[in-house]
Structure formats: structure tokens, C-alpha cells
Image (cartoon, helix red, strand yellow):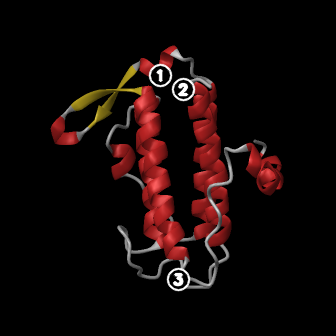
Amino acid sequence: MTLLEHLRRMARNSLWSNDRVYRAVVALQPGEFEAERTSFFPSIKETLNHILAVDRLYFDFLTDGGRAAAAYDDFVPFDDAASLAAAQADFDRRLIAFCDGLSEADLDRRVITDRREDGMIPERIGDILAHVFLHDIHHRGQVHAMLSGTSVAPPQLDEFLLDYDAKPRKDEVERLGL
């Protein structure tokens, strides 16, 4: 497997993992989505909004969108889980399409990232994508832990890459068109 193939699989894993997380989150009882919890961000709502805000920031960098840091600064957090879930799914599908359009050579191409007072830093596309996937996994793990203290059990998030796990994910993969 090439690095590009791996990154494409990770983009699909993000859609699948987010789908599993959001199906749990939209099933929460009233008040649980925004309830204060112990984590890096103080609620499931704030953590999931942060994931999407950062995803959009880095996507702007990757696509030379021209918004730079404003892509993060101008992010308007979602108040309800269903709307946030739809926005995240839309982003995930755009990221899959972006990764599908890359060539191996593109992974070493540098794009400018706006680091505010630290300046405009050129970064490799492959490194940015790896960072985005790690960032999302990190914070999804926090949401997973926070779900343990709610009325909804946290979903299994590690059944995507192995052939062994093909059967448990089959219906979801088909539903998501992966």
C-alpha cells in the first residue's frame, strides 16, 4: 500500500468513524450534548465543533482557499448535534474527494499555512493530511470517553481497516457508499 492509498483509506475512516460517533451523539437525551464534562474541551458539543472548525481550517490550507486563519476564526459553532453531524459528513465527503484527486507527487507539494504571528509556513500536503487525521482521532477519542458518562454507549471506532472487521462494518460501509 502506498502512502496515498493509506491517506485515502484514512479519509474514508474519518467519515465512517464520525458517522458512528454522531449516530450516538444525536441519540443523547436533552442536555447531554452540551453538558459540562471532564475533557480538554468541556463538552461533547464543544469538542465536536472544534474538530469541524480545525478540519475546515486545514482544508482551506490544502486547497489554497484564501481564507487562511479566518477559516477558523469565522467558524460559527453548531448548537444542535444533527446540524453539526450533517456539516461534518459534508466535510468528510469533500475530504475524500480531495484525497481521491491527489497524486503521489502531490503529497510532497507544499502549501502555505497561516500561523498568525509565527508567519506563513509552507507544509507538505501529506503531512497536513496526517495531522488532520491524528487530530480528529485524538478528539473523537475524547468524545468517546465523554459518551461513557451519558445515556448512550460509546460506539466501537476501530473496526474499519482490517479484513477481520469487514462483517461488522459491512452495512455501514454500504450505507455510506464506501
Q: Which mark sits nearer the N-terminus, 1 or 3?
A: 1
Marks 1 & 2, CB-CB < 8 Å contact: yes
Would you say 167 lies left or right of 117 here?
A: right
What type is the residue that disc 3 sits on?
Answer: Gly
In the orientation shown, which residue stands out farthest toward the front?
Answer: 164
Q: Which mark is residue 149?
A: 3
Would you say 114 lies left or right of 133 here?
A: left
Q: Which mark is residue 33?
A: none
Residue 106 visible, this orientation: yes
Q: Identify which residue, 146 or 160, lies in the foreground.
A: 160
Q: Which residue is mark 2?
A: 3
What type is the residue that disc 1 sits on?
Answer: Leu
Q: Which mark sits nearer the N-terminus, 1 or 2?
A: 2
Viewer-nearest of discs 1 and 2: 2
Would you say 129 lies left or right of 69 here?
A: right
Q: Which residue is mark 1?
A: 107
Quick check: 31 above or below 56?
Answer: below
Residues under labels 3 and 2: Cα distance?
37 Å
- Identify the element where label 3 is drawn: loop
Q: Residue at x 57, y 22 (%)?
A: 102
What type is the residue that disc 2 sits on?
Answer: Leu
Q: Which mark sits nearer the N-terminus, 3 or 2?
A: 2
Q: Residue at x 61, y 23 (%)?
A: 101
- Identify the element where label 2 is drawn: helix
Q: Residue at x 79, y 57 (%)?
A: 168
Quick check: 26 above or below 109?
Answer: below
Q: Residue at x 54, y 26 (%)?
A: 3
